[in-house]
Image (cartoon, helix red, strand yellow):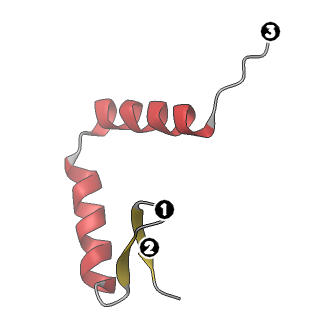
Amino acid sequence: MLVFVSSFEFSNSFLRTYIEKHGRKIIKARWQYMLNKNKENVFWDENEQCFNLKK
């Protein structure tokens, strides 16, 4: 039997599994590295409610 799972449910489940295995520290370090490298191009997108890179 196939069960439909929304992309949000899938990504949320994937993130929780990743955090259980590896912790949050590596996610924070990767985000911090990306932000420091691209800080002049990162902005908060009000419509999408997330950070984005300027084109």
Residue placed under numbered mark 3 in the picture: 1
Contact (Cβ within 8 Å) of mark 2 with mark 1: yes
- The mark lying in front, picked from 2 and 1, is 1
- The mark lying in front, picked from 3 and 1, is 1
User: Is residue 10 rendered to the left or right of residue 32?
Assistant: right
Q: Is residue 44 above or below residue 15?
A: below
Q: Could you say whether the residue bearing mark 2 is in a helix, strand or loop?
A: strand
Figure quadrant of residue 2: top right
Give the x, y percent position of residue 35.
28, 76
Circle nearer the N terminus (2, 3): 3
Residues packed near mark 1 inside 10 Å, few (<14), some (14 to 19) or many (20 plus):
few
Q: Residue furthest top?
A: 1
Circle nearer the N terminus (3, 1): 3
Which residue type does callout 2 highlight?
Asn
Residue placed under numbered mark 2 in the picture: 52
Residue placed under numbered mark 1 in the picture: 48
Screen quadrant of the N terminus: top right
Residues packed near mark 2 inside 10 Å, few (<14), some (14 to 19) or many (20 plus):
few
Figure quadrant of residue 15: top left
